[in-house]
Image (tube, grey):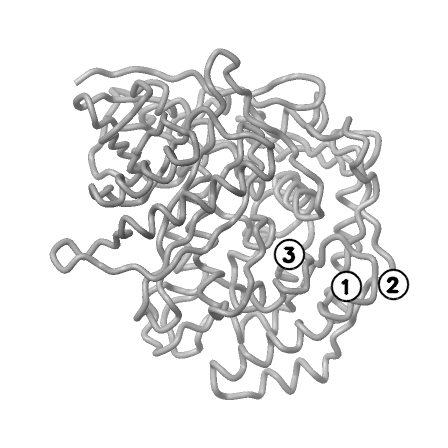
Amino acid sequence: MKLYSIEEPELQFAQGTHACPRAGITRYDVYDSRQESRRERIHVGVVGNSQGLDKLHEWLEICAAEIPGKPGAVQPNLFPAFCGFNRQSGFKADFLYSGEIVRQITNTDLKDLNKIEMWEQRVDQAVELYYRDIKFLAQNRTVDVIVCVVPDTLYSKVAVQQDSEATVEEVAAGAEASDQSHLESNVEEDDEDELTELETNFRRQLKARAMALGKPIQIVREHSLGLDVYDQQDGATKAWNFCTALYYKSGQTIPWKMIPDVNRPSVCALGVSFYRSRDRQILNTSLAQIFDELGNGLILRGTPVQEDKVDRKPYLSAEQAAELASRALNEYRDAVRNMPGRVVIHKSSNFRPSERDGFRGALRALGVSAVDFVTVMPSRLRLFRGKLYPPCRGTRIELDSTTQLLYTRGSVSYYSTYPGKYLPEPLELRMLESEESPAVIAQEVLALTKMNWNNTQFDGKFPVTIGCARKVGEILKYLTEHDMPQIRYSFYM
């Protein structure tokens, strides 16, 4: 066993590089700010009741100016000031919010909805209530992104079933702190193992229903809007996550990008994950493709797969793997006008020989011979330091020639602390076939954990290839086989 340390990957911004998205945007501006095609005014459509609309308007005005960092924070790099969302500071853009692109839900409609006794019917009606106004704005007004403000009274009725003993906050308590975004609606997430015959989830259902309208939506709980919400993140952190997500969803390109290694062939990273249908009877494949080091990518939906009767894990057939790889690489070619020099495939379970044969055959037919097969999964193994803090993020342990552990969460020197609440688990990286060394594979995975534009704290656990594919599956299960999924990640985050 050998132990190594990977230096924190830098990110590229418009005027320079930095390891932290927040510091990079503040000092060097968002990456696409110098592109002539970008817009400096983002039209924000809003759906909500009168109180929610007023709170969002006030919140957007607050976000337009600088917000001080967390008072008394002993780790200033973890809780920095927000630079302000305006044309003079890091985002180089303004939010446009006006009465013409607002749709008000009446309190009478909300009261009638809350009277519905059946859980599934209540959620269905809530989705329909918001969908009508989302549809109007998307089809009749100039909007880039639509914010749906969920009143607290409605949230308590559609976020979690009333007969459940656990609250939504308690269900989410097992997630690591940096994965929580109090504005984008992790607040409505329900437990995956709920005992209903058909999964009913307000957030997922609304995003799936509105997808065909072609405008990304951001779901916000009314309770989250404001600087002085005692049980949530500090105001600056909320503004960073909210504004960055809204900026990306508005159709701009990217706030930051990975820095490519000019001495190596261009890389296309594919992430393969699986999701169950709403009735949990059918397993499907979701694929999140990263076009290149920019992070530009698309979403593809695979076909139903079978679970192995012995290990109960899902696997692709050779034909399914080949078809998925062909579709992904053809989309890559259409986007960047050439094929990558190398493809790395991340999968959340082991690769079977038939899967590798299918992927490899399709890639070779398209002229790509260099491919890495990497299984990315949590590990129960732990490394303990002789100090109060857990191992550092970037700690890499080679167990043998094909297996290594990588701490993507852990103590962060830039933050001067471990920013999580729970003992971090490393990722296990299994490389059954690999063109690159374990060090390069681990470095790429660590960099890809920073490509989530829904959270500006950079110590994400999973690379975007796996994390994105999982989030995509949550929404795809609410689409029928005849619905055409959007290919941009902004419709799923």
Q: Quadrant of residue 284?
A: bottom left
Residue 436 tag number = none
**Residue where numbered disc 2 is placed:** 99
Residue 218 tag number = 3
Q: Residue at 50% of width from left, 67% of height from top?
A: 479
Relative horizontal placement of residue 51, taking residue 176 as reference (left or right): right
- Mark 2 residue crowding within 10 angstroms, few (<14) / some (14–19) / many (20+): few
**Residue where numbered disc 1 is placed:** 53
Residue 253, position as x, y percentages in the image: 68, 38
Residue 47, position as x, y percentages in the image: 73, 66
Q: Residue at 29% of width from left, 40% of height from top?
A: 377
**Callout 1: helix, strand or loop?**
helix
Amino acid type, callout 3: Gln
Q: Earlier in the sequence, mark 1 or mark 3?
A: 1
Q: Earlier in the sequence, mark 3 or mark 2?
A: 2
**Callout 3: helix, strand or loop?**
strand
